[in-house]
Image (cartoon, rainbow, N blue to C red):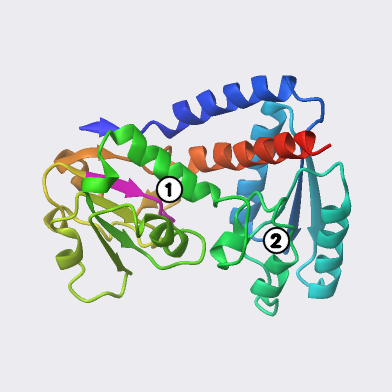
Amino acid sequence: MNIFDGRKIRDQIVEELALKVTALSLRPVLAVVWVGDDFASARYIEAKQRAAEKIGIHFDLYKYSENATLHEVKERITELNNDEKVSGVMVQLPVPKNFDLNDLVNTIDPAKDIDGLRYCSEISCNFRPPVTLSIMEAIRQSGVELSSSRVTVIGKGYLVGAPMARILENQVVELRVADSNTPYLGTMTLDADIIISATGRAGIIKPNMIKNGVVLIDAGTTEVGGKLAGDVSQNCYAKAFYYTPVPGGIGPVTVAMLMQNVVFATQIQQNNE
């Protein structure tokens, strides 16, 4: 049984990116647009700011109340697209329910969409979503060959499940996609070599639903009794060949992958000067 140590891998990526930034003639600038007061968003933004500061990325936060209009926010994104100093632009999700998300995302310059939201919306994008990069890194670290694996993705969400399925569809022997409401979910998971779950339903994956030697990638988090819990019941770990814990697995690496996208965007920007 092997464990994906997300915090250790995050720290390695952050260290490597800090070295890359010192070699750049441009300072990377990440602009984050946040609408509303979602508690979880505040925590994620703080984590992003801490990582940016460690690497040497300048972090700008543009905060709007939940009463802001879509037009106002789109105007700000256009301004940031046109600002040569800004390397990457991201919109912190969720946005207010009255916003047209596709319209908002379509405003982001593909070359600055370091959060890969355009990819999630199935429009042209220069970057893959950081969480999908984190999941692919976890699979790479497991040592299991994707090309000879049966993979089940649980969750069809905009940010994780749907883009992950698109990335994997031509890379695996068999891809199955389910969600938390799929009847007899265990029939989709029992012979899977790799299970990627992103439903936010604590403990939805149970030991009787998996085979021995499976790779468990847990990208779903929810709060249970004041603590973070994953989609995969901890009772499953003993049967797994490799697993990502919650907390401390996919989450920390996702933040590092966002920063990697920012640094890549800056390198491209510098080469185009």
Residue 13 percent coordinates (x, y): 54, 28
Disc assigned to residue 52: none
Of residues 32 and 125, the one nearer the viewer is 125
Above or below, comparing residue 270 to residue 113 in the picture: above
Residue 243 percent coordinates (x, y): 28, 40
**What main secondary structure does the magenta stretch of the protein show?**
strand
- SS class of the residue under badge 1? strand
Residue 202 percent coordinates (x, y): 34, 58
Above or below, comparing residue 263 to residue 12 in the picture: below
Q: What residue is shown with label 1? A: 227
Q: Amino acid at mark 2?
A: Asp
Of the 4 image quadrants, the one containing the N terminus is top left
Q: Residue at x 62, y 57 (%)?
A: 125
In the image, which residues are magenta?
215-224
Q: Amino acid at mark 1?
A: Lys
Marks 2 and 1, the one that precedes in the sequence: 2
Q: Residue furthest front?
A: 272
Of the 4 image quadrants, the one containing the C terminus is top right
Q: Is residue 13 left or right of residue 223?
A: right
Which of discs 2 and 1 lies nearer the camera? The answer is 2
Above or below, comparing residue 66 to residue 227 in the picture: below
Residue 228 percent coordinates (x, y): 43, 48
Q: Residue at x 19, y 65 (%)?
A: 188
Disc assigned to residue 37: 2
Q: Residue at x 65, y 37 (%)?
A: 264
Q: Is residue 85 left or right of residue 104?
A: right
Residue 263 lies in magenta, yes or no?
no
Within 10 angstroms of label 1, few (less than 14), some, or many (20 or more) residues?
A: few
